[in-house]
């Protein structure tokens, strides 16, 4: 049997810095846990545009389809703000999601106890928080047609289309119900059925799938605006939240702040099973390329490292090793290791990206 294969697309901004720490963790698993991976690396986003004039070449796209999992850092930066829409760095990421058909985007928001005082919300609201946002990732207003900017009379009109088919809603709903069964067995579905037909259909399909296949799971529905409010009012009422592409984008950024820092949130984007039984998969931190701190050794590598933990869990059937890595992260935070984004109101002196990597590797060694 050959080693499992990983394609690393570190991307732009702080992507390469945080991914450098992930690579050390991957090496550790090869050396210390006898879990070697075959790694290849390539470009995505602005760096791919600079070299090839496109944010994702066909060759890289083909490679992504072949590997067992893709690890992505971040894409984008101010340098690319004025590029045509079709070649913006973000298009590279969107093409990967679409062509790999990664319809189920798992964004866990967990508040580590050591960071409960760092959230902008009160400790008692966030301590012990453990929720999972399941965001539909391949359809909705991100991809709907028609789209574009055109002239009507003497003024410009911008158009995007929110569009969902029944089967698109059904498959992401199933993935949310499946996850809930392995957690606290509760799903809250969010849409705007009060104003959008796509929201009405969303609610109908989620309700039907629930009745037919998952009646054992507790299901509730919420309008997404109320959901945003509830998420900051009392986030612990939720277990799994399932929602569309755009609402999921917004709600997951809000949820990130509950955990203390955007630098903490990993994600997994999963599609259909491949021939080897593993799902098509891409893992990436929820944070972006953070151009303001790029190249300064300030970035927090934890979101990217926890994304690799999700890869261990969801692609490589190594839940115990994922637990080990998550426990190592929890340990270093409990010991007081803080990158700049994790300094609380009282300040303190931050450690660098690499030092955070060192601390996590030391905690992994100590776990053996
Ligand atoms: C995310 C990001 C992306 C999105 C951007 C970079 C295209 O915000 O993954 O949440 O909007 O989906
Ligand atoms: Mg986003």
Image (spheres, rainbow, N blue to C red):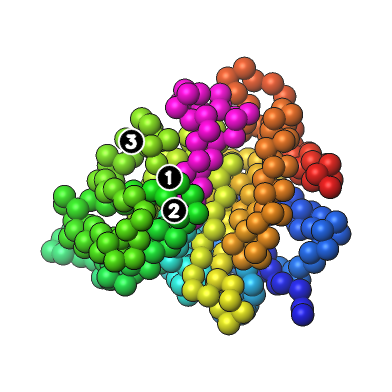
User: Bounds of the magenta span?
Assistant: 106-133
Choose mark 1 or mark 3, whichever is in front. 1
| Quarter assignment of residue 350 | top right
- In terms of secondary structure, where does tag 2 sit? helix
Q: Is residue 217 magenta?
A: no
Query: In the rendered view, does 9 fall on the left or right side of 153?
Result: right
Q: Position of residue 172 (x, y in %)?
A: 39, 63
Q: Position of residue 280 (x, y in %)?
A: 55, 72
The residue at which mark 1 appears reads as 239
The residue at which mark 2 appears reads as 180
Q: Are marks 1 and 3 in contact (CB under 8 Å)?
A: no
Residue 364, compared with residue 201, is above or below; it is above
The residue at which mark 3 appears reads as 230
Whether residue 157 is visible, yes or no, is no
Q: Position of residue 84 (x, y in %)?
A: 43, 64
N-terminal of the pair, mark 2 or mark 1, is: 2
Choose mark 2 or mark 3, whichever is in front. 2
- In terms of secondary structure, where does tag 1 sit? loop
Q: Are marks 2 and 1 in contact (CB under 8 Å)?
A: yes
For residue 25, the mark is none
- In terms of secondary structure, where does tag 3 sit? helix
Which residue occupies 59% across, 34% down? 112
């Amino acid at each position: 049997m050959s080693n499992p294969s990983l394609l690393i697309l570190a991307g732009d901004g702080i992507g390469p810095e945080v991914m450098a720490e992930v690579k050390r963790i991957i090496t550790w698993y090869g050396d210390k846990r006898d879990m070697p991976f075959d790694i290849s690396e390539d470009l995505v986003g602005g760096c791919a545009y600079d070299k090839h004039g496109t944010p994702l070449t066909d060759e890289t796209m083909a490679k992504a389809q072949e590997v067992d999992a893709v690890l992505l850092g971040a894409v984008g930066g101010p340098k690319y703000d004025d590029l045509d829409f079709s070649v913006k760095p973000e298009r590279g990421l969107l093409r990967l999601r679409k062509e790999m058909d990664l319809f189920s985007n798992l964004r866990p928001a967990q508040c580590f106890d050591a960071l409960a005082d760092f959230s902008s919300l009160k400790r008692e609201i966030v301590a012990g928080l453990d929720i999972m946002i399941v965001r539909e990732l391949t359809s909705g207003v991100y991809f709907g047609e028609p789209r574009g900017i055109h002239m009507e009379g003497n003024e410009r009109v911008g158009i995007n289309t929110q569009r969902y088919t029944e089967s698109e809603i059904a498959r992401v709903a199933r993935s949310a119900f499946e996850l809930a069964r392995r957690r606290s067995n509760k799903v809250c579905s969010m849409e705007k059925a009060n104003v959008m037909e796509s929201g009405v259909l969303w609610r109908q399909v989620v309700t039907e799938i629930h009745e037919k296949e998952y009646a054992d799971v507790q299901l509730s529905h919420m309008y997404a605006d109320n959901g945003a409010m509830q998420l900051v009012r009392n986030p612990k009422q939720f277990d799994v939240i399932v929602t569309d592409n755009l609402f999921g984008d917004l709600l997951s950024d809000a949820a990130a702040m509950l955990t203390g820092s955007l630098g903490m949130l990993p994600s997994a984007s999963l599609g259909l099973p491949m021939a080897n039984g593993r799902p098509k998969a891409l893992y990436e931190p929820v944070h972006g390329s953070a151009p303001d701190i790029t190249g300064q050794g300030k970035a927090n590598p934890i979101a990217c490292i926890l994304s690799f933990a999700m890869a261990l869990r969801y692609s490589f059937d190594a839940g115990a090793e994922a637990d080990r890595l998550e426990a190592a992260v929890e340990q270093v935070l409990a010991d007081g290791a803080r990158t700049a984004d994790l300094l609380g109101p009282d300040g303190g002196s931050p450690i660098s990206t690499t030092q955070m990597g060192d601390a996590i590797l030391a905690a992994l060694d100590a776990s053996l």
